Structures are given as structure tokens and as C-alpha cells.
Amino acid sequence: MSFHHLDQYAHIESPITHTPPVVRLLGTVVVAVGAAALPLGAWGHMAVLALLVGLIALLARVPARVMLLRVSGPLAFVVLASTAVLFLVPGQPVFHAGPVVVTDAGLLRFGSAIGRAVVALGAAVILVSTTGFPDLVSAFRDLRLPRVVTTSLGLAYRLLYTLVDEIERIERAARSRNVGAGARRRRQLAVGIAATALTRSFARGERTYRAMLARGYHGEMPSLRTRRVDVNSLIGLGLLTVTVLATTISAYMIR
Amino acid sequence: MQGDRCLAHIPDGFLSAPVIAGAAVLSAAALAVAVRRSQSRLGEQEAPILGAATAFVFAAQMLNFPLGAGTSAHLLGGVLVATLVGPSVAILVLFSVLLVQALLFQDGGIAALGANTLNVAVIAVVGGYGSYRWLLALVGMGTRRMIASAAAGAYVSVVLVGIAVAIELALSGTLPLVPSLVAIGGIHLLVGLGEAALTAAILAMLMRAQPELLRRESPPPPVRRKWVYAVTAVSMLLAVTAVYAASARPDALEAASRRLGLGESVASYFQSPFADYTAQIGGAWIAAAGGVMVVFAVGFGLTKMIVRTRRNP
């Protein structure tokens, strides 16, 4: 298993990859919060934010096909989760879908949830595509997230590859040795695999920690890629924030 | 039940700005307390233990456990991790997992990260671990009792997550409160059974294979145990007698719901036998007594069932 395919546009020269990771992270949060704060049914304003995300993707040189593919996976979960909204919210009946009645208020909330989610997911996909995980951790550090959290995230990221690979191997072996086994047997196997993963992750954590101490670790994870926040990045972030704020506030003023 | 990932990890687009901001402030405060406590508890071992536990929870959430009838569930892991490394470390572990899931895999929204942290890392761990410790104080120490209490705590943690998600969605105006509680809370009542079973099974396996990994819980002193019994008895007494002293005016949540206009839009999808704390036969006293007995029976039955299963595998 590898997460390297996620940040495949991190090493491409673009105006977005030239900005420090902390600015990219803050920009993503601004777009996600701006979209979440839009009132129900603000379709035009959602479209403006979606266009903004599309423009940033263009600047980041993330192809539209990649954007659509990566957004569609999590979006399927969002659609699944928001289906209940269609018929649980009381309102004027719009149409009957079998035994349930889809209401206008339900449709409004469903559409708004999907619209906001598309914008936020698009922003998140650009961040992940253009930023490697170690850079994200350094961005958290720049945002003064507790040191213990950033250090453990860095460690977990290194452990995760080997651990997930190991779990997949054990799972495959268990499946092949138990072809045709019933749900009870498969449950027992899954519990066994989870318990094995737990003991191995703690054992690996301990070994990794000792190895780090032997290499001079003193409680701070050093980073080879340090990029200072420059004026241009701050201006870019400021412009983005003003645009998102203006879009969100105007949505409330028009109502 | 594969969909519990969607429900426990709220995506962006479902919560309103005030709920996002309020949840972010509350979870930031809880994380600050957890950081301070975990540093004093683990010392310099903090980072490797947190890293290992984070990697485990992340990997375990990728494993789906077949429940039958074509459904599967995955572990949330709050109470399991809390029994291994303590509640404050568990809060940080689950926050780290949520952060990675939201940013790398878009599983749970970025704007909704504060709410997801509040639900999955804070409410689930504090509520679930608190229930575990409370049950341990009631039933006493012992391997089977620990496993049964942890299972009950895990169940409580998942149900609390469901209730918290439902309330946040209602406060955001996405769903009316009652249908939201019935739909999301109801699903989590079922998902909680899977979490309880998984927590019990993994703990039992760890106790056999590597008991040194488990956190050593000190038995409560006799005076404290008496206090736990006393508080439990007084709570039951209050639940039964306080219905007569209760005000007929709306409570804070009801008042807030009415002010937000949620009260008018609430539709009744489920007629409870004890609706508004009143039974059709016997009135408020029977409703309170029935409620207390049902809650006690569910908790007691669940604990006994798990203890018996462990004795006769």
C-alpha cells in the first residue's frame, strides 16, 4: 500500500506548489468553511465557489478527469448519507418514491448538502494532490498544533505503510486458507487480525522509537523541506479569503 | 452498516456555520486538556505510543467485520484505545485519525472536523470510558468484568456519537430533531452492538496473548465504591421521584429548538410508550420507573450476556 499516488501533482511546477503548505492548508479551510456557511438554496453562490475551486485546480495543473475521479468516491458516501434528508424533512410533497414521500424542503436540503460538499471536496482534493503528507505535518506544526500530535502523525504515517501492508497480507492468507467459511469463522479471523495488528503496531512503535533515539531524536521531528511564508503567498491567501467571504456574505444579503 | 462511516464522520455540507464554530471551540478546548494530561501521563514515551495507536486505529477502521445479512461494520476504537493507553491519549489518537481521514481520504469534512472530533474523539471516548470506569466500580475488578464493562462502554460510546450527530444536524437545520434522533440514533443502537462485540473480542484476545499491553486499572477503594453505589441509587431514586417536581415549561433544548423553528417542523415517526415521560397506564411514575428499569435491564443484561459468553465460549 502507498499513499504516494495521492500527491502526484506535488512535484509539478505550478503557482500552487510554490506557495508554502501552511498557506495551501489555510486556503482549503477557507473554501470549505465558506461553502459550509452558505445558506440553503444559494445555487448561484455555490457555483461561484465551484468555479473558484476549478480555477485553483487549473492553476495547480490537476487535470479535470483526476479531480472528477477523486471527488466522485467520497461524494458517493455524501449522497448515500444525505438520501434520508429527502423524505425525513417535512414539507410540500414533490413526488412519491415507493412508500416514501420526497418533500420540497427535503430536496432543498439534499441539493444544498451535495453542492456544499462538492466545493469542499474539490478544495480538499487539490490540497492532497499538491501536498505530500510530511509537508502537511509541517503545515500543522506552523499552525501551532500540539507538538505531540504532529510528531505522532509523522510516526503514524511511517508505521501505517508497513502495518496496512502486513494486515493485507495476513487477511489474504486467512481468506485463502478459509475459502467458503461462514460468517462466524470470518468474524473470528477478522478479530484475530485486528488483535495481531494492535500488538504489532505497538511493538513496531517501540522499535521505531528506539531507532529514532539512537539516531539523535530529542523530541522534535526535523524537516528537510522548510518553506517560509512570503508576501506573494499571503496576498494570494488574502485574495482567496476576501473572494470566499464576499460570496458567502452576499448570499445572505440577497436573501 | 457500512454506512456508519458516513454517519459518524459528518461530511461537509451538512452543518451550519454556528454549529461548525461551536463544535470547533469545544473540541479545541478538550484537545488542549487531553494534551496536558497525556504529557504528564506518558512523558517521553508519548509520541511512539500515540503514533502506534494512531496507525492501529487507522488500519483497524479499514478492516470490515461481517455482521451477516450482507452488512458489515468497522471499529471506531475509542473505548478500546482508552482501555489500553488511557482516555486523554485516546482522544489525541482519534483526533489524529480523523485529521488524516479528512485530509487524505476526504472521509469526513474539513469544515466539519471540529464536530467530528467532538463526537468521535471527545464525546465517544469520555462517555464510553466514563461508563466503563463506572461499571468497573459497580461490578468490581476481574478479567471478565473488565471485558464486559469495556463492551458496555463501547456500546455507550457509539450510541452517544449517534445522539451527538443527530443533535448537531438538528441544530444546523438539516434534519428535524425527532426524525434525526430516531433515524441516526436508531442505526447507532445497532452499530453499537458490533462495536461492543469487537471491543470485547479484541480485548479478550489481548488479555490472553499480551496482557502487559493493557492499562492496569487500580481497583476503586471501598469508600469510593460505596460512593458509586450511593450515587447510582440516588440517580435511580431521583429519576423515579423527580417527575412530580419537574416543571411543565420547556427545557433549554426544547426552548432552543422552538426558537430555531425546529419544533414546528418536527414530525412524529415513532410513538414511544413513555412519550413526554408519561405512560398511558399509571402516568408519570410508571413511565419513570419503567424507564429506569429498561435502562438498568439493558445494561445489566448486556454485561451478564458478555460475561456468560466469555465463561462458555
Image (cartoon, grey):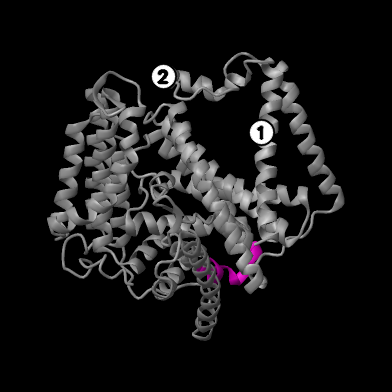
B278 vs B177, nearest the viewer: B278
Q: Which stretch did the figure color magenta?
A: B40-52
Amino acid, disc 1: Val
Q: Secondary structure at mark 1?
A: helix
Q: Residue at left 65%, top 40%?
A: B298
Q: Residue furthest top?
A: B248
Q: Is any part of residue A40 visible from this angle?
A: no
Image height check: is B204 above or below B27?
below
Q: Residue furthest right?
A: B223
Image height check: is A255 above or below A66?
above
Q: Quadrant of the N terminus of chain A?
A: bottom left
Distance between the Cα atoms at labels 2 and 1? 32 Å
* Dot 1 crowding, Cα within 10 Å, few <14, some 14–19, many 20+: few
Residue annotated with mark 1: B294
Looking at the picture, how far across and down is residue A118, in whole percent? 24, 45
Q: Do discs 2 and 1 belong to a common subunit? A: yes
Residue annotated with mark 2: B261
Q: Is any part of residue B17 visible from this angle?
A: yes
